[in-house]
Amino acid sequence: PWIKAKVDTGAKTSSLHAFDLHEWRDEQHTAHVTFWVNPWQKSTADAVRLTRPVHDRREVRSSSGKARNTGTSPDSISGMTRVRLGK
């Protein structure tokens, strides 16, 4: 699916707004995260459920300066852009 995105070309990483996140482990104890994304800005139409392995954990700061630890996951949404998905 297509996702409307605004990319900061000067940033080292980018994020994707996700909701209804659930982290879990498989039989081999590998961490995964299942979540939903809305591909269209200001719309809940065509929401997509994704499940990805957790790749790393990082401290992330919001625009207000509040820090939290979050999991990341490598992925290729369009086949051209690498993004990290997570909490």
Image (cartoon, rainbow, N blue to C red):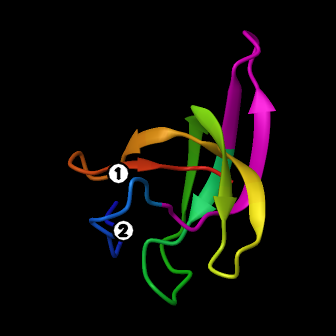
Magenta-span inclusion, residue 78: no
* Residues drawn in magenta: 15-33
Q: Nearer the viewer, residue 57 or 1?
A: 57
Secondary structure found at label 1: loop
Q: Residue at x 79, y 33 (%)?
A: 24
Q: Nearer the viewer, residue 62 or 20?
A: 62
Which kind of residue does numbered mark 1 sit on?
A: Ile
Give left or right: position of 14 versus 68.
left
Quadrant of the image occupied by residue 55: top right
- Where residue 44 sits in the image (x, y, percent)? 56, 81
Secondary structure found at label 2: loop
Which kind of residue does numbered mark 2 sit on?
A: Ile
- Where residue 35 sits in the image (x, y, percent)? 65, 53
Residue occupied by mark 2? 3
Q: Can residue 58 be seen in this snapshot?
A: yes
* Residue 83 higher or lower than 40, as above or below: above
- Where residue 12 sits in the image (x, y, percent)? 39, 53
* Residue 34 higher or lower than 44, as above or below: above
- Do residues under tags 1 and 2 come within 8 Å of each other at their CB atoms? yes
Q: Can residue 54 be seen in this snapshot?
A: no
Distance from disc 1 to disc 2, alpha carbons, whole Å, reads: 8 Å
Residue occupied by mark 1? 77
Q: Residue at x 43, y 80 (%)?
A: 40
Q: Nearer the viewer, residue 65 or 45?
A: 65
- Label 2 crowding class (10 Å Cα cut-off): few <14, some 14-19, many 20+? few
Quadrant of the image occupied by residue 29: top right
